[in-house]
Image: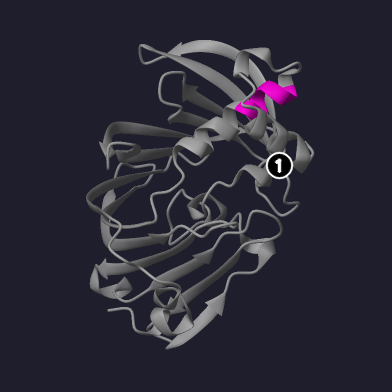
Amino acid sequence: MKYWIWIALTLLGAPVAQAETAQEKGLAIAVEADRRDKGFGDFTAHMEMILRNRQGEESTRRLRISTLEVKGDGDKGLSIFDEPADVRGTALLTFTHKVGEDDQWLYLPALKRVKRIASSNKSGPFMGSEFAYEDVASQEIEKYNYKFLRDETYEGKPCFVIERYPVDKHSGYTRQQVWIDQAEYRPWKIDFFDRKDSLLKTLVWRGYHQYLGKYWRADEMFMQNHQSGKSTLLKWHDYKFRIGLKDADFNEASLKRAR
């Protein structure tokens, strides 16, 4: 979908129901969801990452998240692991871009070095989880082409179901089906299809809460890998918005300072 089309839809305030094609309607839904989440500025949060293997054995990691909204581009994000001891100080820095490849760097304290994540490795697992590196970057509109599929009720909520197709040739997915509620335009579920177009993973959001009277964030994100039998649960808490984060908090030096 051309860049100017979604700009025109936004500026003209075109109602989703009046979009002429399935592609335009899917794009209009994505644009509205993005519009409703703009302007938060920055936030920090704590997270528990619970990894579960096919046998049901679990391991837990704890980390801190910082995110900075960037005008005219994608978000900047910093994830710092605190527990367990063998991953303490490991940190991921992500610069998401609206157009082109994202920039990601991983700091490994045991080696005391920063490793750049190559574009060809973005589909790889982040720290052994079922989330890929591309999953933990902000989901910018321009990274996908869109198509509206249907209206459907999910967990008692009327939802739009749209399909989006990654623009990046290095993506590990051919397509993603997304359930977005019609009341608040929040994502509730994504089915991810691999490069062979087989169902690979499903992500669901649970327990949304509203912050600053506008911005919705979920308590939990659960990713199930249907092919491996593994899963990852992310439990979010202690959200703090507009604390004054700056660009200087998101650079290679900040990775090495991670404690």
Which quarter of the figure has residue 199?
A: top right
Q: Residue furthest right?
A: 2
Near mark 1 (Cα within 10 A), the count class, few <14, some 14-19 or many ≥20, is: few
- Residue 9 among those drawn in magenta: no
Q: Position of residue 58 (x, y in %)?
A: 27, 49
Q: Where the C terminus falls, by quadrant?
A: bottom left
- Amino acid on which disc 1 is placed: Arg
Q: Position of residue 60 (x, y in %)?
A: 25, 55
Residue located 31% across and 32% down the image: 206
Q: Nearer the viewer, residue 163 or 53?
A: 163
Display colour scheme: one colour
Count of marks placed on residues: 1
Mark 1 — residue? 195
Q: Position of residue 192 (x, y in %)?
A: 58, 35
Q: Is residue 193 above or below residue 246?
A: above
Q: Residue furthest front?
A: 12
Q: Position of residue 1 (x, y in %)?
A: 77, 36
Which quarter of the figure has residue 65?
A: bottom left
Magenta region, main secondary structure: helix
Residue located 44% across and 62% down the image: 77
**238 relative to 141 in the view: left or right:** left
- Residue 24 among those drawn in magenta: yes
The span shown in magenta is: 23-28
Residue located 71% across and 54% down the image: 170
Q: Residue furthest left?
A: 238
